[in-house]
Image (tube, rainbow, N blue to C red):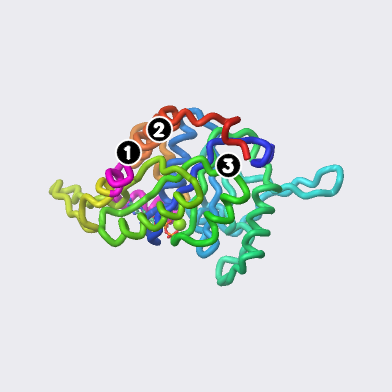
Amino acid sequence: MKLTQLAPFTFAVGSGKGGVGKSTVALNLAVALSRQGLRVGLFDADIYGPSVPIMTGLRRLEPPIRTDASGREHVLPFTKFGISILSLGFFIEEARSVTWRGPMLHGSLNKLVTDVEWGELDILLIDLPPGTGDVPITLSQLLKIHAAIVVTTPQEVAMLDAIKAINTFSLLNIPLLGVIENMAGFTIPETGKTYHIFGQGKALELAHRFSVPLLGSIPLIPDIRRGGDEGVPSAFHKGDNECGRYFEAIAANVTQQMQNKEVSYDAHRK
Ligand SMILES: Nc1ncnc2c1ncn2[C@@H]1O[C@H](COP(=O)(O)OP(=O)(O)OP(=O)(O)O)[C@@H](O)[C@H]1O
Ligand SMILES: [Mg+2]
C-alpha cells in the first residue's frame, strides 16, 4: 500500500533548532508506539544529515527493491525494532554534502512518497531536518500531514526556533499536537542531584503559548545517547527500563491526543 492510497496518521517531528533530539525522539517514540500495538513507519526526511540509518544500525544498507510485472520499482522499508524504517540516508552517500535544489528535492521526496511500499500503517512519523525550510513545505504538498510534534530543549534559544517552526506548520495548515521537552536535566546517579544544563521551563512555556499539551519531558540520559550511537533505540528494551518509560508515557499521550482530536482517516485523505 502506498502513502497516497492509504492515510495513516502522519506526524511531522520538527524543532527549528538543530541537535535538540528530533531524530532520537522520533525513533524512540515510533518504537514505543509500536509497543502499544500500532503499526508504525518512520521516515527520516533529513536532507542535510539523515541520522536514522546510524541510530537503527542500518548504516550503508540499501533497502530492498521489488520490481512489479510492468517493470516498475518499489522501495520496501526496512523492518526493525517493530517499526518500518526508511531514510533519505539510504539513497545518498554519507560523506557527500548534498546541495538540494528545489526541483531535485521535490522529485526525490515525491518518488519516496509514491514509490515506497509501507504496507498497512496506523502512524507515520516524519523526522524533519532542522530549520523551517523546504522539506515540510514540499512534503505537505505531497501528502497530508495531520499534525506536528515539536521537540525542544528547555532553553530560550530553542524555544524561539521552535516558534518559527510552529509558524511554518501553521502556514501549511498543519495543527500542532503538542510539545516534547528533551534534555530536560541531568541527574547524577550517585548523588541524585539534578543539573539543568539547558535551562528550565521553556518547553512548558511554549506549550502554554500555543495551548497544546506538553506531551512529555525527557532528561539527559547517557543510555539514550549510547542507544543512538550503537544503533539500538533505548526505548527498545525487554522489561522495565528508565528510557523506555519516558517514551512509553509520551506514546500514551500522543495516542490520547489523537483520540481527543478525533482525526478521521477519510476526512484527511489528500
Ligand atoms: N535525552 C537525551 N539524553 C542523552 N542524549 C540525547 C538525548 N536526546 C538526544 N541525545 C543525543 O544528542 C545528539 C543529538 O540528537 P539528535 O540527532 O536526535 O538531534 P536532532 O535534533 O535530530 O539533530 P539534527 O538537527 O542534526 O537532525 C545525539 O547524539 C543523541 O544521541
Ligand atoms: Mg535529526
Of marks 3 and 1, the one in the foreground: 1
Residue drawn at the location 81% of the way across and 43% of the way down: 68
Q: Which three-letter amino acid code belongs to the residue tagged 3?
A: Ser
Q: Quadrant of ligand 2?
A: bottom left
x and y, in percent, of residue 243 in the image: 34, 42
| Cα–Cα gap, marks 3 and 1 | 27 Å
| Cα–Cα gap, marks 2 and 1 | 9 Å
Say which element carries label 1.
loop
Would residue 42 appear left or right of 108 to someone viewing this image? Answer: left
Magenta residue span = 206-230
Please tell me in which quadrant of the rendered image residue 77 appears: top right
Q: Are marks 3 and 1 in contact (CB under 8 Å)?
A: no
Marks counted in the figure total 3
236 and 131: which is toward the camera: 131
Q: Is mark 1 within 8 Å of ligand 1?
A: no
Residue 41 magenta-highlighted? no
The residue to which callout 3 is attached is: 84
User: Residue 213's mark?
Assistant: 1
The residue to which callout 2 is attached is: 257
Say which element carries label 3.
strand
x and y, in percent, of residue 170 in the image: 45, 49
Earlier sequence position, callout 2 versus callout 1: 1
x and y, in percent, of residue 267 in the image: 57, 32
